[in-house]
Amino acid sequence: MTQLDTLVSAPLGLTGYRVGTPQCAGELTMVPVWGPEHRGFVPPRSGLKLNRVVGYGKVEMHNGASEGVAIVPLHIGYIQDAAQNHALCSAALLAAGQTRLFDDACCVQSGQGGFLEGRDQWFFVLPVELRLRALELRKRRDYSKLWPDISDLNRRYGLPSRGHLEQILSRERATLTQFRSRLELLPGQLGALFFVGGSFVGLELAPDPVYFAEMWMALVCFAYGVAAWQAETKRDAQRQAEAGQVARAEPYEADGPAELRAELARDRAARMDEIASWMAVPASGTWTVQEEERYLDLRLSTVTGDHVAGQVVTDGERLVYASLFTNRR
């Protein structure tokens, strides 16, 4: 394993975090991360609930655990039948048993009414293409504030130009959830670096493996799977256009299992070297850190760099949670 702070030298206290062998699924590359575990934090699916939608742009979250702080994940959103779908523009800290109203949520489904009725709900994380804008819009009380960006994203993806994110998340859910099975969540894994087409798109770190496991689908399938799905669609279209002109990979020239294993090892090593060269990009340039809120010794801060933006939670000098993504639009 390689130490993460030797690859990503950002002011985030990454000492002790280690990266493992990358996994590739089409255009999406995931580099698993292991590191210090911080117990006492409530996982987002089993402990944190969207209580109700009070009105457009106003959602109520509840930490149902009897003990433990809930870190509300950055840009978490909920899809439910007969409800207005919303996403949060910022992470948050909720004490055990606390209920909190967020009045700066963004509606991600224009033109359809309805409120939460206690039915089954599933959550997502905003696609990376929308995350910088959503972060910029935190604290602005305007439920429709993300509709123009969602509309533009739909248009770029060849879908009707409307502020309906479910055109991607719900209607393409079967396609997007394939990334969950194509990439393997490893024992003890509590974070990951994500790349699409060789470009950095995100770094996600959780307090412990249980928390990260509950975030796995939302991150792999929706936060970063959407961009990877589109990159694969463009790649396949280009290959079809260039049919007959693309050079085919030559088969291995091996005389036995030992030579074949050596050829495979050389290819794998070359691929690992290529992926390692991508990892230094997120850390270059300058950074600013702005505290947003605190609970006891915990601090939630917004981090902005020349190439990366996002939010982190720290406990003193220790990094507990991070959700950082490319700031390219």
Image: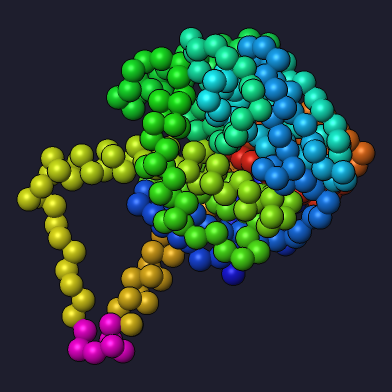
**Frontmost residue, 144 versus 56:** 56
Residue at x-position 74% and y-position 51%: 207
Quadrant location of the N terminus in the rendered image: bottom right
Q: Position of residue 295 (x, y in %)?
A: 88, 35
Q: Position of residue 163 (x, y in %)?
A: 46, 16
Q: How is the image coloured?
A: rainbow
Q: Quadrant of residue 170?
A: top left
Query: Does residue 114 appear in this view?
Result: yes
Q: Residue at x 62, y 17 (%)?
A: 115
Q: Position of residue 248 (x, y in %)?
A: 15, 60
128 relative to 6 in the view: left or right: left
Q: Name the residue located 69 percent from the left edge and 55 percent from the top edge.
A: 210
Residue 45 included in the magenta stretch of the image: no
- Figure check: 195 above or below 60: below
Name the residue rendered at 38%, 35% in the picture. 172
Seen from the viewer's position, the closer of residues 280 and 122 is 122
The picture quadrant where one finds residue 82 is: top right
Q: Looking at the picture, does residue 56 appear above or below residue 41?
A: above
Which residues, given as a range, are shown in magenta? 254-260
In the image, residue 325 above or below residue 133? below
The residue sitting at the left extreme is 244
Drawn side of residue 25 relative to residue 92, left or right = left
Name, please, the residue furthest toward the right. Answer: 296
Q: How many marks?
A: 0
Coordinates of residue 123 in the picture (x, y in percent): 58, 36
Report if residue 5 is visible in the image.
no
